[in-house]
Amino acid sequence: MIGYLGFIVAKVLLGIVQALPLPVVIRVARLLAGIVWIFDSRHRKVIRHNLTIAFGCDPGHHQLVRATYRRFVENILTAAWIGKRTDIELKPLI
């Protein structure tokens, strides 16, 4: 029952994202990314640790971690938005 309810919620959210114009989808994604960034300290630490391994200690990592969250959520919501678009609708965006 919980699985089916989750499916229905996901389907409704997908429909909402697909009904919005792309600039609104991007703004919603950035808002959601900010919320996730605030509450997801575990993954924030993992990203910061990985950046330190890759690039050494850098105070600018804070901005890069936030940008990682923002781009990740933007990619997910934009992919959902694209799913309902035709080639004709997408051509001006390429």
Image (cartoon, helix red, strand yellow):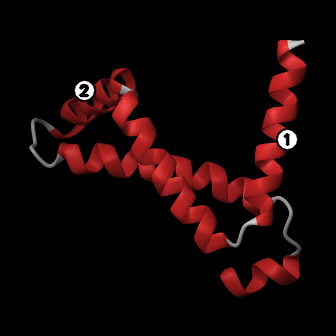
User: Extreme top residue here?
Assistant: 1
Q: Quadrant of residue 3?
A: top right
Identified by mark 2, the residue type is: His
Which residue is drawn at the image coordinates 25% and 26% (left, top)? 49
Q: Quadrant of residue 81?
A: bottom right
Q: Quadrant of the C terminus?
A: bottom right
Compared to residue 67, the image places residue 6 above or below, namely: above
Residue depicted at 13% across the width and 36% down the height: 56
Which mark is drawn over residue 47? none
Q: Are marks 1 and 2 in contact (CB under 8 Å)?
A: no
Q: Nearer the viewer, mark 1 or mark 2?
A: 1
Q: Position of residue 19 (x, y in %)?
A: 80, 64
Quarter holding residue 82: bottom right
Q: Mark 1 falls on what kind of element?
A: helix
Residue 64 is situated, as x and y percent measured from the top left of the image, at 28, 49
Q: How many marks?
A: 2
Residue 79: horizontal and vertical position, in percent? Answer: 70, 55
Instruction: Mark 1: give few (<14), some (14-19) or many (20+) Cα within 10 Å.
Output: few
At label 2, counting other C-alpha atoms closer than 10 Å, the crowd grade (few under 14, some 14-19, many 20 or more) is: some
> Which residue sits at x=73%, y=66%?
20
Looking at the image, residue 52 sits to the left or right of residue 86; the answer is: left
Residue 69 coordinates in the image, percent (x, y): 42, 44
Q: Is residue 36 left or right of residue 41?
A: right
Gap between marks 1 and 2 measured at Cα? 35 Å
Which of the image's four quarters has the N terminus? Answer: top right
Q: Does 62 sit left or right of 89 as displayed?
A: left
Label 2: which secondary element: helix
Whichever of callouts 1 and 2 sits on the residue coming sooner in the sequence is: 1
In this figure, which residue is indicated by the disc labeled 1?
11
**Does 83 sit above or below residue 8?**
below
Three-letter amino acid code of the residue under disc 1: Lys
Location of mark 2 (residue):
49
